[in-house]
Amino acid sequence: MKAMVLAAGVGSRLRPLTDEIPKALLEVGGAPMIERVIGRLKAAGVTALVVNLFHLGDRIMEFLASKGDFGLHIEFTREAELLDTGGGLQHAAWFFDDGRPFFLHNVDVLSDIDLTGLLRFHQQAGGLATLAVQSRPSPRRLLFDRDGRLCGRESPEGVEWARGPRSGVERLAFTGIHVIDPAIFPRMTETGSFPITRTYLRLAGEGERIVACRADGRYWQDIGSPEKLEAARKRAAGPPA
């Protein structure tokens, strides 16, 4: 199975730490975040992955080489400018040539979400993409109908509907962990830098199945600020839960 790790971000909210260290190499519990993410993907059956690079990308390549690429086949894509999650995935479309679903995972997300279960859910649901989501507070949430299909998103700017306003929706926070079918690539009409959620919303509006897989009760932490990094480090240093 294949996967992509999104590791191109500058980590501007983590400065000055990320002025000389790429966000992917910031350590939590004695291991860089990218090592933790790759370890979980490998445990879920991933044998080949692609990593996108921008800020201090050579440092990431050197680290992975020093670890023998963790026994995986690893490729890289370099971005001349940040392409965001959707543009970054589109730029790596060539890697996913086996017709099989793959993981897409943010490098700055630590969790104990069951990746094998997420893949199994995706295969059973038969959607174009399956998003691991949780019922938790978040300023930006995705909206899903009673069948678990994406129908909109909510942000401080308001609600954007993919398939028209509807009642009975669930507002769920996205984790930055997906399983995607490569059939999505011919359907990605967006270009340049764009978030993958923009593509998801458009495709949902066109009738494609973009579905939710609940991961409530699982540990999840994004490392988007010094405070969140410290919280993750404290948890990693504490006694086992």
Image (cartoon, helix red, strand yellow):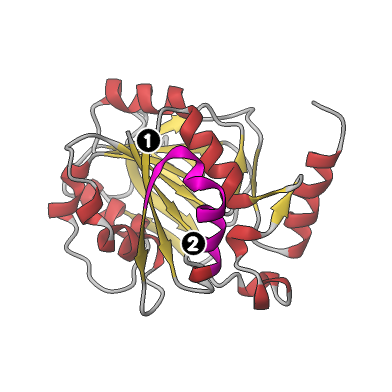
Which secondary structure class fits the magenta region best?
A: helix
**Residue drawn at point x = 62 percent, y = 51 percent:** 33
Q: Position of residue 197 (x, y in %)?
A: 36, 55
Q: Position of residue 141 (x, y in %)?
A: 50, 50
Q: Quadrant of the N terminus?
A: top left
Q: Name the foreground residue: 202 vs 237.
A: 237
| Magenta stretch: includes residue 70 | yes
* Total marks in image: 2
Q: Is residue 175 visible?
A: no
Quarter of the image holding residue 167? top left
When the figure is inspected, residue 125 is found, relative to residue 134, above or below; the finding is above
Q: Name the foreground residue: 152 vs 86.
A: 86
The amino acid pointed to by label 1 is Thr
Relative side of 181 to 71, left or right: left
Q: Name the foreground residue: 113 vs 213.
A: 113
Task: Give the SS element for disc 1.
Answer: loop
Relative side of 157 to 101, left or right: right
Mark 1 / mark 2, whichever is N-terminal: 1
When the figure is inspected, residue 137 is found, relative to residue 53, above or below; the finding is above
Q: Position of residue 97 (x, y in %)?
A: 17, 45
Mark 2 nearby-residue class (10 Å; few <14, some 14–19, many ≥20): some
Judging by the rendered image, the residue that carries numbered circle 2 is: 61
Relative side of 126 to 174, left or right: left
